[in-house]
Structure formats: structure tokens, C-alpha cells
Amino acid sequence: MVNAANNTNSIAIDIKAHFEPFSLSIKQRFPAQGITGIFGHSGSGKSTLLRIIAGLEPNAQGQITFDQQCLLDTSTKRFIKAEHRHIGLVFQDSRLFPHLTVKENLDFAVKRCQRPSLDFDEVIELTALNELKNKSIQQLSGGEKQRVALARAILAEPKLLLLDEPLSALDKDNKALMLNLLVTIKDKLNIPMFYVSHSMAELQQVAENLLILAQGKIVDFGNIHQVIHRLNTPNNKNSLIKQQTSLALTVKAHHSEYGLTRLTINSDQHIYLPLLDEQIKVGSELRCFIFANDISISLIEPTNSSIVNHLFGTICQIKKQDSSVLLTIECGDHQFFTHITSLSFKQLQLDLNKQVYIQFKASAVKTFHLPSGV
């Protein structure tokens, strides 16, 4: 069993659950702060884990402690009911009351909170619902409904917020707005969140930590960027994700005359991506990623090239398989991953500790932030 001592700012889970033909077995301590992403194939146990934490699966065996409170301990027959756990749950469908207005749906959440302390208008502003308060739920778009569902969950003042694929039905622009919204809420209200998604791009944008599940068991857990990098494999057939470099970089400048935004790698090196909305302030952090197939290698600095991004680095890891090679290149404090053919590897005579240049187009740098003009 998980030791319940010293559980301040952590969620300790040691549970087993069996649902024919599926079994879940999780033993892990999670930080009760920031956003923890949960990722895995369909049927890996992601949603089941959330339901157990929320108290919606009473047949789970084991122990869960959170905020110095034991929510579940089957050895002592302790089970805190879902309505007393102070845990919010947002599903992929909004599950709002269709016959009520937006404000009436939100008022319902406030009434359920015994000692409301959040400012109603502040939550409305944070979730960008000021102009929708008096609308019927049936008048809202999918993205607007999810914002209402999120606001309703927040106004119940949960100690923990569980998000079960809340953006799966939204288009890219609405996903971008919701992801930015989640980060703002996390920073402003300091509510820890567990975020389940099939999209690594979504999780990479918002999560500090990442849990990987497969067939009901933990495959990996840790810092979001490090776990993504550990998922990179030379042969991508059985991989959970497309090989990529995951980054969190500082915005250095917006160059509107060139349609580019510049990010800092270190004091000497930087990269460009398509111009972002200038509301993304210089000095702020930007999450972004680059697929390994979009990065190429050169033995000389590619100065006379239309490709704007080229970085100097050292090969620190080589993974060979079949007719391809996955290289890890250290550029300052960051690691970049490039996938090349065995022929290129041989012709360039690459080896460990060899110094090279990597290059990639500005358009290869992906982020969920909205581009300028959107």
C-alpha cells in the first residue's frame, strides 16, 4: 500500500481494478499541482483511472490519498463518495442542462458549493463567457459548451480537476483557445488537473508531467518533455507517437516584416517559426515540437540556404534499426532528434561526439498557439 504520510501536495494512488477482459493496476505518486497528462492507446485505462479517482468506480481495490485525506482504503473499508471528494470531472461531451441558460447552468454549480470563495465574475472572465451568459445552451457551439462545462466545474471549487478528452470534438482553433484557457486557469486559480487525451500535441502544450499507460499498467511517468523523448524509437511501427523533439522555449521577438517569431535556444542560437499572435508576449514561454523527419543534418554550416533554422550540435546518441537511424543531437541544453536513412548515416560518416549542423524550416516548428491574424 502507498504510505499516507507526507502526502501534502501529492496524490498517492495504489489501486487495482478488474473489468472483464481488462485489468488496471496503478501505483504512483503524482504532484498535486500543475497539469498531469495521461496518454495511451484506446483501452489502456486512461478514463477508468479518472473514474476511480473521482469515486465513480466503487469496485476498485487499494488506496488513494489526496490532500492529506484518504479517499479510498479497501483494507479498512473506507470509501469517500464521489460527491464528497471535492473533485471535478469534465467529459468530452459537456453534459450541460439543455433547458437552462449558461448562467443558470453555472448558478447550479455555485449552489452545490457549501462555502463559495471564488468570484463568479472572475471565473466568467477567465473562461471568456461574458457575452454568452444569457444564451440558451442549445444556441452554443461545441467550443462554447466546453467552456461552460469547464466554468461549471471550476465554480464547484474542486481541489482537483479531471479532464477526460474535453477537446476531442473541437476544431484546431477552438482547441488552441481551450488549451490557452486551461493554462491561464491553472496559473490563476492553482487547481491541479489530470488531463486525458489521445493527442500528444495537446498534452505537450499544457502538461508539466506525463503518464503513459498501456494495457492498464504504467509504461512511463515524468517530465513531459523527457517522457516524450523516451518514447522516440528508431522503428516507429510500434511507437505510441511520431518521433519528435519537444521544447519549451522563450519568445525572443516577433518579426512581423518577415512573418516570423524568434525563440531562444541559448545565448548564441535561436530558431524561427511562423509569426504568432503578438499577444504572446516577448519573454513568455512557448511550448513547441518538431518531428524528427523534418530535421536534416549537414557537416558544414548551411549559410546559403532558404531554410532559416540551423543549429550547431554534437551527436550524443545513435539508435540503428533496419534501414534507418535515429540520432540525438545536443544543442546547448536541448536535445534534438532526427530520423535519417542508413545511407545518409554512412555517406556522412557520422559517429558519437561528431559535431554537426541540424536544419529545419520555420514551418516545421509546431505549436497550438494561434498564428498572427487568427
Image: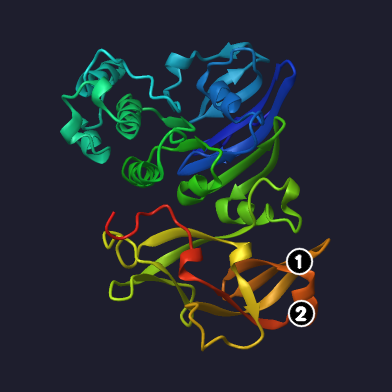
Q: Nearer the viewer, residue 267 or 75?
A: 267
Give the quarter of the figure containing the C terminus: bottom left
Point 53% across, 16% down: residue: 56
Q: Amino acid at mark 1?
A: Val
Does 70 appear above or below 32? Answer: above
Residue at 52% x, 88% y is 303
**Vertically, is 217 above or below 350?**
above
Amino acid under label 2? Answer: Leu
User: Which quadrant holds residue 329?
Assistant: bottom right
Say whether residue 14 is left or right of residue 81.
Answer: right
The furthest residue to the right: 322
Of residues 360 and 63, which is closer to you in this image? 360
Q: Residue at x 56, y 85 (%)?
A: 302
x and y percent of residue 103 in the render? Answer: 20, 23
Which corner quadrant of the image does residue 92 belong to? top left
Q: Residue visible at 61% across and 56% down?
A: 226
Above or below 335: residue 298: below
Q: CA distance from mark 1 to mark 2?
A: 11 Å
For the residue labelled by badge 1, is the local secondary structure a helix, a strand or a loop? strand
Say which label, 1 or 2, has the lower sequence index. 1
* Image disc number at residue 350: 2
Is residue 318 rendered to the left or right of residue 248?
A: right
Q: How crowded is the residue under tag 2: few (<14 C-alpha within 10 Å), some, or many (20+)?
A: some
Determine the secondary structure under disc 2: loop
Kindly identify which residue carries mark 1. Answer: 325
* Place of residue 256 in the rendered image (x, y in percent of width and height, measured from the top left): 28, 72
Give the number of marks: 2
